[in-house]
């Protein structure tokens, strides 16, 4: 399964796992990113700009490497 930063612009993915400690999990959860979340890549130049539950946020590429996603095909 790909990590979040391997998705292309306008691709969506469902978060399958997050590799990291409690601090990382809490930080991501505050932004609405947790196992089961659906994320869409808005921009992947520099930090990733993603949309989660109608909120647009920015996360670093190293953090995105720790988020495993399953690609979602088609529009949802």
Image (cartoon, rainbow, N blue to C red):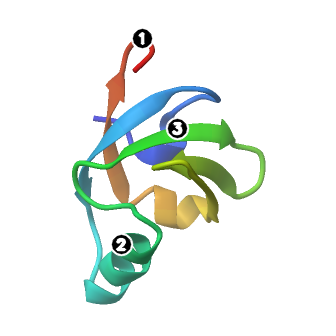
Front residue of 20/50: it is 50
Instruction: State yes or no: discs 3 and 1 in contact (Cβ < 8 Å).
Output: no
Q: How far apart in space, not on screen, are marks 1 and 2 (Cα)?
A: 26 Å
Label 3: which residue? Answer: 40
Number of callouts in the render? Answer: 3
Label 1: which residue? Answer: 74
Task: Give the residue displayed 38% in from the left and 61% down from the top.
Answer: 33
Front residue of 10/2: it is 10
Q: Quadrant of residue 9?
A: top right
Task: Give the residue displayed 61% in from the left and 26% down from the top.
Answer: 10
Task: Give the residue displayed 59% in from the left and 59% down from the top.
Answer: 61
Q: How far apart in space, not on screen, are marks 2 and 3 (Cα)?
A: 16 Å
Position of 44 with respect to 52 (left or right) is: right
Label 2: which residue? Answer: 29
- Where residue 72 appears, as percent x and y from the top left, is 35, 23
Look at the image and tell me in which quarter the N terminus lies.
top left
- Where residue 75 appears, as percent x and y from the top left, is 45, 15
Q: Quadrant of residue 13?
A: top left
Task: Give the residue displayed 62% in from the left and 60% down from the top.
Answer: 57
Reply above or below: 46 against 13.
Answer: below
Reply above or below: 5 against 2.
Answer: below
Position of 36 with respect to 75 (left or right) is: left
Query: In terms of secondary structure, where does tag 1 sit?
Result: loop
| Among numbered discs 1 and 2, the one appearing first in the sequence | 2
Query: In terms of secondary structure, where does tag 3 sit?
Result: strand
Q: For mark 2, does the 10 Å Cα neighbourhood hold few (<14), some (14 to 19), or many (20 or more) residues?
A: few
Q: How far apart in space, not on screen, are marks 3 and 1 (Cα)?
A: 12 Å
């Amino acid at each position: 399964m790909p990590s979040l930063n391997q998705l292309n612009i306008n691709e969506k993915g469902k978060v399958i796992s997050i590799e990291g400690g409690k601090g990382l999990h809490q930080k991501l959860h505050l932004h609405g990113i947790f196992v089961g979340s659906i994320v869409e890549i808005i921009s992947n130049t520099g930090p990733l700009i993603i949309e989660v539950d109608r909120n647009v946020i920015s996360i670093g590429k190293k953090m995105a490497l720790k988020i495993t996603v399953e690609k979602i095909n088609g529009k949802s």
